Image (tube, coloured by chain):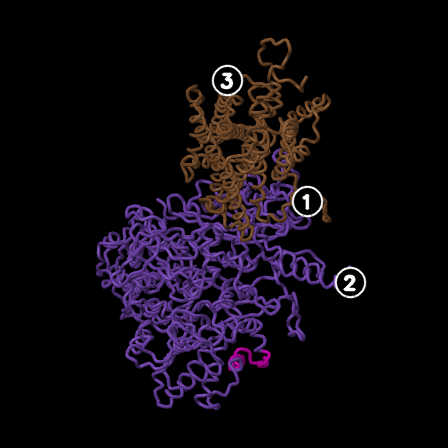
Chain colours: A brown, B purple
Amino acid sequence: MEKLTYRSIDEDVLRNMQAPTRTYYYLLALCFAGILLGAFCWGYMIATGIGVAGMKHPVFWGTFLINFVFWVGIAHSGTLISAILYLFRAPWRTAIARSAEAMTVFAVVTAGLFPFIHLGRVWIVYWILPYPNERNLWPNFQSPLVFDVIAISTYLTVSAMFWYTGLMPDLAVVRDKARGIRKKIYGALSLGWTGSHRRWNHYGKAYLLFAALATPLVISVHSVVSWDFALSIVPGWHSTIFAPYFVAGAIHSGLAMVLTLLIPMRKVFRFEHLITMNILENIAKTIIFTGLIVGYAYATEYFMAYYSGNVFERDTMIWRAIGNYSTAFWIMVVCNTLVPLLLFFKRVRTNLKRLFAISILVNVGMWYERFVIIISSAAHQFDPYSWTHYSPTWVEYGIMLGSFSLFGFLFLLFARFLPTVSMTEMKESLEPPRRNHRSRSISGTGEGSS
Amino acid sequence: MAGFDRRDFLKIMGLAGTTAAMGCSPESNRTLVPYISPPEDLVPGESTWYATTCRECPAGCGVLARNRDGRVIKLEGNPSHPVNEGKLCARGQAALHGLYNPDRYRQPMKKVRRNQWEPAQWDKARAALADRLTRIVNRGRGQRIAFISDLQTGTLGNLVHHWLSRMGAPPPWIYEPFSYEPLKEANRIAFGAAVLPHYHLHEADFLLSFGAGFLETWLSNVEHARSFARFRTPHEGRKNVFVHVGPRFSMTAANGDLWIPVAPGDEYLVALGILQLAVKHLTPDNISGKLGGQLLAAAREIPLEDILKRTGVEKNLLEKVALAFAQARTPLALAEGLSFTSPHSLETAVAANLLCLVREESMKAIDFGQPSSVQDCDSSRRMRELCTRMRRGSIELLLVHHANPAFFLPRSWEFEEALQEVPMVVSFNTAPDDTSRHAHWVLPTHTPLESWGDHVPRKGIRGLMQPVMGPVFHTRHLGDILLSVGRQVRGPHAFPAENFREVLRCAVQKAGEHEAPHVPAREFWQQSLRRGGIWPAREEPAKAPPHRTLSFSFQRAFRTQESPEGLHCTLFPTVQFFDGRGANRPWLQELPDPVSQVTWGVWVEIHPDTARKMGIAKGDLLRIQSPHGETHAPALPLPSVAPHTIAIPMGQGHEEFGRYAAIHYGHPLHLLSSRTDDRDGAMERQAFKVSLEKHGRTIPLANVDGSIYQHGRGFARAMPFREHQKGLAAGTRPHLYLPLPEGYDPAKDFYPPHDHVDYRWAMAIDLDRCVGCGACVVACNAENNVAIVGRDQMIKGRFMSWLRVQRYFEEDHSEMRFLPMPCQHCDNAPCESVCPVYAPHHSKEGLNNQVYNRCIGTRFCAQNCPYKVRRFNWFTFTRPEPLNWQLNPNVTVRQKGVMEKCSFCVQRIIEAKHRARDRNEKVQDGDFTTACAQTCPADAIIFGNLMDSRSRVRKLIEDPRTYQVLRELNTKPAVFYLKKLTQNPFEA
């Protein structure tokens, strides 16, 4: 492998911003078509009523909230990688932080749509906001949904700013190499970055500040999302384990999604020397860890149901495993807790194909986890007379496809128009060029450039 | 700007504004058109109540119709009426859907081709009928006219008789599918009078029913439900025992203390067995003498061993029932007496009478002084004769009024083919049905709610009918049609009366001369109309039958051989559809059947074990074949029948009955032959077994129950009667979390209690009184504009009713419990805390209000409601014109995306508070009640103010059997249930 230099990093990273291939356009068109389909389905649902989805009495929450939790979960490991690992000085995060953070922003954007889609009367959704109105009506701050609005919007704001702050010096690099209209656009986006010492100083402080701000959000946002469930009294939801359980699940799914995105990207953009196998291995090891936490949470739920002697809780748990949705339950258990154990084998976690397959399986498993939690509890609550069976309709599948397309679309645009690897941080990790050149190991990350 | 001045600008702005306004039309298009000269008794916003009589079945309950701004919006029972005392059943409530049925005939119709109709003018229609009549009458062939009508007892019946006689025609065929011929014949055999007496269930102290569904359709179900509630209200430390013998665990059976399952047709054997075993416990004066000898002879005709062997009833059990029977002072035995439900209905009816004959005291419960008018219906034999005459071509003109024989008569009768042979069929129907589709002319008549008239449900009671609103469509009263056609045919002098109303007024005033001689005629008429009819001031004691004797042989029935193959089959009428006439009422279609919980469709009840053995799953379409015919219906495995029996409901399978009766299969009467019984003239129901065959197709059942069991969750609870007595004696208080400040405990409650001002509304539901009929559900739908969602949405689980009567089987299938479940109006409501926009709102009076306008549809409230009483508007459900005329203007009509639920009839609360304020006082207990409580025939629902220490609800909840559903969740519900009281006097 050739040695990394400042120049080579610039060239490698900016290669993805050259004119794309035809395949790229096909993919972009495909995603756009998916978005259109999702938009049509949503429009149709607004025009006719939520009844075109499969929800029914008493499963009032269906795939919309499943997808909401799924996408919020995806968002989390982006911040984990970009902020927490930054604070913890884990050098292997450098190459993937930008993509992971982009994934966070796009996943939150996608997730944020679902509460809107879910609403029966989305046209008055602003009533949930504490806006001044002539009737002095405030939202109900007791409601976990209001927590949700605050948590998600905060998260979106902070992670977007964090992402953008990190982008700024790189945008300046792009600007410097661009011509014509591109130069103007990137010039505006880089907010007149000059690379002066002052700027680097401010940049470093801001970046650290946002990292520090984003870190607790990783824990808090998904905890709040879990309270949508835990603060209700529904058997299977009403549990104190939910916050850590959801956070671990979120990171689990997010790491898997990072692998799902990075492995193809690494190949397409030939980033093998930037995103090394070592990095992928580290992610894989973390997945083992989160998978074990998730598995422990599953076991705890069953233990609590057994030990509490609560008949409703116990029946719900038994029913999850053997009832209508037992297939979903066993997919969840196998994909989330058993499959990641394979990563203990070095042969598996260093094989890209296997790693990719496992990441997909974990994603599927995590989607089903939300399905099992939301649907099986709702369908099998206190009143046996009201037990039922729910299955999604084409509208819900359409919207779900639309959400994946939206995420893919945004990520494709990102891959084309923005530097997908942080050049700044990569350069920081290099040995600074000196006249009296001495062989030195690559130092840790530095704050700002010296 | 040149050439563009201020005026041009305004013009363009105006145009743009108009375009914008037209582009998005508002969701509701409201127009208010004031009267130029309003009717005298119409005050906008105020209801006017008109007394009339329900004609949904022959029981003839008194009705008060609530008219708001010219449209009737709700029916309630007439509290002073002796039949129903202010209560109505589901069918009575749904009479409005007959009135506002969108499929009604809107004007006269003339058939031009098969299945093709064109509207006609009334003059033309009347002329067509008059022409034909004139031709027939002038040729002296009046005998070739036939008139089929449903039961018409009063003045209209007399007019029809008179009119027919003036035409030289035979008297009308009074056709009611439920005409109880076997019961009449059995009463002739036992009591010497072929009548349908009036049963006072509450006079009895031991009740035996041989298949009689007296809480569902039998003779007069509302009256019987009230009477039954009195019968089994505990008094003097005991609770009367009711034993149901029959092939199906029906709603009536579910209200008994014991259900003895027998094969259809074997009920009489159980009765004989009871008598044989009771002999040793009876005092000699009951079974000595001539009558006693006759009874014993009849009972002993079949040896006890044979009875036990055939019926499979344990001797031990039968002994105990016999002992209870012998110890009772006034035992009463009832038999269904419908010939087609089970074989040997005459034997069953006679055997029941046999038991009634044992003690003279039983006659206190059977009143021969007030026989039911249903006995005036013609027997199936007379219908058979008409059918034969029609086939022979000797009927030239057939007039049909409100009767629907083409639906009810089995296919083997070939009634529809016979109709083809009649050159002219004229239907006086309100809506298209199976019979009127074969008519050549339809002269649509008013529905009973638009009509003048009177109805005599039983001797001594004459309910008056008056139009409770103007006619909805261009229809006429049958009386008016007959009068004007009669004048055209017979000349003006033949029918001098101006219109039917005058005829009725004269008849009532004439009755007044006798009833109240010193009241002026005009005033008597007004008074009677206002009261709703004419009846004696107080109930008279039961009149004895002409004689008590018995000579009857059960041998013939016992020796009938059934094929060993196949399954027994019982057909049953349902509380929703009666004989099928309710099938075009969407409220009734959407009311879950009390036992099967199925809506919008037909089903076959089959025991789960049998179904498993035969490889039949729920929804499998079955071909059910008898030796005489076949029918098709989807299977419903349910432990409501014995393993050897299947049960099929009647009422569905209309060929044509409007858009709501869209199930064209599954009419069980097609299993019957065309023969009539030679003894009672009823439709013969042979003792046959049916074979089941799978079509290989499944039809989804729109049932609303998830699990049939409670899974130990204590939703519908019961308590042994003895234990309750002990609790009462010991002064045990129930353990409740009251929805009042006293129900809060800082150790347990995070939030402080609510401060209620003056009122804390609450409800007590006595599960020991609730019979499960579902009247409350339909009343609630009517009062609160609850949407009808239709079969497809029902299958998807989107039913909207605010109140549901849950049905739970006990795990051993020995007991069935009903649990009406409205919103619990919790004081610590899980729905309130989770809504982000405060749409569920706790009022100062403890109501859990749902603010529709505030709701954004997150559905969190419903998800968090442990009682699952919240309903979401998955679509904007609409009602076709004129069904929407029924909407209650006091209640918001909900749009898509909004959550709704039981409001404790908040509009009634507000109205009551307004009235109380006018009197300068607080609302008193009993000033008003909710729609469900108002109509409950058994008075199982009591609504009131919990903060009023003298209110009935407050007193009721001190009973030791009071409990709150899911109390352990600490929701502090304001709906209190009183446990059902079980007793098993026959336990080993």
Relative to residue B309, is residue B30 drawn left or right?
right
Query: What segment is highlighted magenta in the picture?
Result: B503-523
Say what secondary structure mark 2 lies in: loop
Q: Is residue B506 magenta?
A: yes
In the image, B797 versus B60, the foreground residue is B797
Q: Which residue is mark 3?
A: A1
What's the CA distance linking mark 2 and mark 3?
Answer: 78 Å
In the image, A443 versus A423, the foreground residue is A423
Q: Is residue B985 magenta?
A: no
Residue drawn at x 64%, y 49% as measured from the top left: B854
| Main SS, magenta residues | helix
Count neighbours of disc 2 (C-alpha within 10 A) and say few if under 14, some if 14 to 19, many if 20 or more: few
Whole-percent x, y for residue B299 in the image: 27, 60
Q: Nearer the viewer, mark 2 or mark 1?
A: 2
Say what secondary structure mark 3 lies in: loop
Q: Which residue is mark 2?
A: B5
Query: Label 3 sits on what residue type?
Result: Met
In terms of image quadrants, where is residue B471?
bottom right
Q: Which residue is mark 1?
A: B755
What's the CA distance linking mark 2 and mark 1?
Answer: 64 Å
Whole-percent x, y for residue B328 in the image: 39, 56
Q: Do circles 2 and 3 both sit on a common chain?
A: no
Whole-percent x, y for residue B336 in the image: 36, 62
Whole-percent x, y for residue A44 in the image: 53, 51
Query: Label 2 sits on what residue type?
Result: Asp
Q: Say which chain tag 2 marks.
A: B
Query: Label 1 sits on what residue type?
Result: Asp
Rendered-image quadrant of the C terminus of chain B = top left
